[in-house]
Image: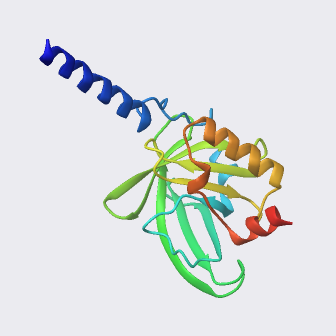
C-alpha cells in the first residue's frame, strides 16, 4: 500500500513538472511560405531574446541578406554604435540555406561546419516584419524593415508569440523600439 502511494506521488510530481516546464507546448509552426527574393535586404532587430553570442551593448542591430551565386543567402549581421549608418561596433558574416520546400525553415552558419535553425514563424503580408526562432523556442528575434515598428503592431506580434509559448518578459527591446513605445 505504501509503495502504491509513493508511486502515485512520483507520477503526480512528474506530470506537474512536465506541464510547468513546457511539456504542454505545441510544436513550433512556421509560416506557410516565404518568397526569398522578397525576404532579401536589410532588417532591423526591434526585439530579441538574450543570447550569449550577441553583443549586449549594441544600440542598433541589422541583418542584411543577399543572394549568392550558389543559391545560398549571404548573411551579414552588424552591430552599430549609434545608428545604422554610423560607426560599426561588431559584425558577423555567414550563410543560410533553405531546408524546406516553402522556404520557411532555413539553416544558418557563421562557423563551418555548424548550422543552426532559422525558422520564420511570423511574417508581414508585405514583408514589413518577420519573426525568427528555432524549434526549441530558445532564440527569438522580431525584425522590421525600419528601425522600429508601430507599437500596436508590435503588441499584436508579442501577444501572438505569448499564445505560442514565448515569454514577453525575456524580450530585450531595441532602443529605437523602446523610444517609440515610451512615446
Task: List x then y, in percent, for residue 104.
Answer: 56, 40
**Residue at position x 45%, y 41% in the image:** 135
Q: Nearer the viewer, residue 144 or 57?
A: 57
**Residue at position x 37%, y 55% in the image:** 115
Can the viewer see residue 69 in this picture? yes
| Number of marks | 0
Q: Quadrant of residue 150?
A: bottom right
Horizontal side of 94 relative to 149 (left or right) equals: left
Task: List x then y, in percent, for residue 154.
Answer: 75, 51
Model colouring: rainbow
**Residue at position x 79%, y 69% in the image:** 179
Q: Is residue 49 above or below residue 88?
A: above
Residue lying at the far front of the rendered structure: 2
Residue lying at the far right of the rendered structure: 183
Q: Quadrant of the N terminus?
A: top left
**Residue at position x 40%, y 53% in the image:** 116
Task: List x then y, in percent, for residue 4.
Answer: 17, 14
Q: Quadrant of the C terminus?
A: bottom right
Horizontal side of 4 relative to 101 (left or right) equals: left
Q: Is residue 64 above or below residue 55?
A: above
Task: List x then y, in percent, for residue 92.
Answer: 49, 73
Q: Is residue 169 above or below residue 89?
A: above
Q: Nearer the viewer, residue 36 or 119?
A: 119
Residue lying at the far top of the rendered structure: 1
Horizontal side of 161 relative to 26 (left or right) equals: right
Can the viewer see residue 34 in this picture? no
Amino acid at each position: 500500500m505504501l509503495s502504491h502511494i509513493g508511486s502515485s506521488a512520483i507520477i503526480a510530481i512528474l506530470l506537474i513538472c512536465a506541464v510547468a516546464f513546457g511539456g504542454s507546448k505545441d510544436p513550433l509552426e512556421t509560416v506557410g511560405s516565404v518568397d526569398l527574393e522578397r525576404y532579401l535586404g536589410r532588417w532591423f532587430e526591434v526585439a530579441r531574446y538574450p543570447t550569449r553570442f550577441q553583443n549586449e551593448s549594441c544600440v542598433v542591430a541589422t541583418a542584411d541578406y543577399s543572394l549568392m551565386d550558389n543559391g545560398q543567402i549571404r548573411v551579414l549581421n552588424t552591430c552599430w554604435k549609434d545608428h545604422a549608418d554610423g560607426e560599426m561596433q561588431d559584425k558577423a558574416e555567414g550563410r543560410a540555406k533553405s531546408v524546406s520546400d516553402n522556404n520557411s525553415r532555413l539553416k544558418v552558419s557563421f562557423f563551418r561546419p555548424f548550422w543552426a535553425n532559422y525558422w520564420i514563424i511570423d511574417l508581414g503580408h508585405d514583408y514589413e516584419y518577420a519573426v525568427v526562432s528555432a524549434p526549441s523556442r530558445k532564440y527569438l528575434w522580431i525584425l522590421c524593415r525600419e528601425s522600429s515598428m508601430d507599437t500596436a503592431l508590435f503588441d499584436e506580434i508579442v501577444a501572438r508569440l505569448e499564445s505560442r509559448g514565448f515569454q514577453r518578459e525575456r524580450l530585450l527591446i531595441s532602443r529605437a523600439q523602446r523610444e517609440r513605445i515610451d512615446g
